Amino acid sequence: MKKVAVIMGSDSDLPVVEKAITTLKEYEVPVEVHVYSAHRTPEQAREFAINARKNGFGAIICAAGKAAHLAGAFAANTTLPVIGIPVKSSTLDGLDALLSTVQMPAGIPVATVAIDGAANAALIAIEILSVTDDTLADRLQAARAKATATVLEKDSAVAAKYNS
Ligand code: RP5
């Protein structure tokens, strides 16, 4: 199975990013986690991105806050799918990171999730791998069925309480 890289701009992003890591592990997807910054360690970030495909990765998740260029810098250096997590780590509540991550020029895409949307970033990566992996596709389907059952249980409880 292809690996998923989870890159964060700072270890201060870890509390948000952890949800992506645990989700990938729940699905038994091989994960490699690093702290690389587009600004503070640009050489290491570029090196990782350039070699990611030949090193067995199928998708790269990049989480960063403030003037968040990490996902864009990775996308510039690989044709693997890059998923960006804008992290709420500033006085602008993550809107700065959201706009920095999502507003990519045509030709260099970054699939951007919600501010702090680490779980969905992992799920998109898993969905990408599931195109060629039926086991992952089955696990995704089972999780959707479980989520549906949970909501329907809640519906029953609320309906029983209020509906006459
Ligand atoms: C960004 O700046 C990081 O992704 C982090 O969200 C933010 C603050 O980093 P630290 O100053 O806490 O290392 O590059």
Image (cartoon, rainbow, N blue to C red):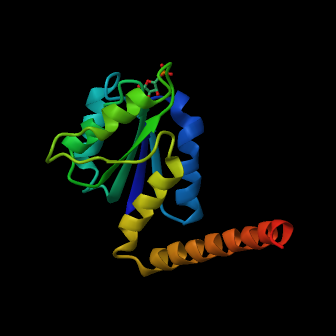
Question: Image check: 146 left or right of 51?
Answer: right
Horizontal and vertical percent for residue 145? Answer: 60, 77
Residue farthest toward the front in the current orientation of the protein? 164
Q: Quadrant of the N terminus?
A: bottom left
What residue is drawn where x is 42% and y is 33%? 64
Q: Looking at the image, can residue 70 be seen?
A: no
Horizontal and vertical percent for residue 9? Answer: 42, 31
Horizontal and vertical percent for residue 31? Answer: 47, 54
**Eyeballing the image, is 9 above or below 32?**
above
Mark count: 0
What residue is drawn where x is 54% and y is 28%? 12
Q: Looking at the image, can residue 16 be seen?
A: yes
Residue farthest toward the left in the current orientation of the protein? 107
**Eyeballing the image, is 17 above or below 159?**
above
**Toward the viewer: 54 or 130?**
130
Q: Quadrant of the C terminus?
A: bottom right
What residue is drawn where x is 55% and y is 66%? 27
Question: Image check: 40 left or right of 158?
Answer: left
**Toward the viewer: 95 or 56?**
95
Question: Image check: 146 left or right of 82?
Answer: right
What residue is drawn where x is 35% and y is 24%? 67
Horizontal and vertical percent for residue 39? Answer: 32, 23
